[in-house]
Image: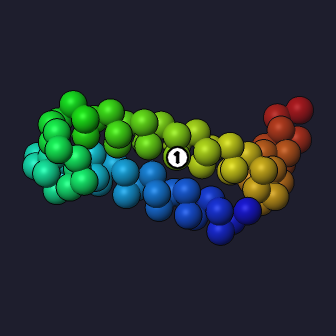
Amino acid sequence: MHTLHSILSALFTFSFIALIVGLIKPGLVLFWSNIKSRTRVLLYCGVMMILFGILTSWVADYDPKYIAEKEAKEATKI
């Protein structure tokens, strides 16, 4: 699971960088599209960021190290 979490985190970071670059110069990010606008960049990269963010947090919940830390914190609260 750690490898999958790393890959999803990298994809989230890549989509964030693509969003910033695309808002400055949309043609660099939307090279395949005939319509190169900031709105399309925001749509594509925004959806990717949301998707990869949700998947990253979902995968992190099943990481054994994360679960052990969470249980240790709960045990110290009581």
Q: Residue at x 68, y 50 (%)?
A: 60
Q: Tell me the kind of residue under disc 1.
A: Phe
Residue 76 seen in the current view: no
- The residue nearer to you, when weighing 60 against 27, is 27
Measured as percent of width and height from the top left, residue 27 is found at: 13, 51
User: Which residue in the rendered view is the most extreme toward the front?
Assistant: 34
Measured as percent of width and height from the top left, residue 9 is found at: 51, 57
Q: Residue at x 25, y 40 (%)?
A: 41
Quadrant (top left, top right, bottom left, bottom right) of the N terminus: bottom right
Q: Residue at x 73, y 46 (%)?
A: 61
Measured as percent of width and height from the top left, residue 4 is found at: 65, 62
Q: Residue at x 57, y 64 (%)?
A: 6
> Does 5 sit above or below residue 46?
below
- The residue nearer to you, when weighing 17 against 69, is 17
Residue 16 seen in the current view: yes
Quadrant (top left, top right, bottom left, bottom right) of the C terminus: top right
> Does 9 sit above or below residue 46?
below
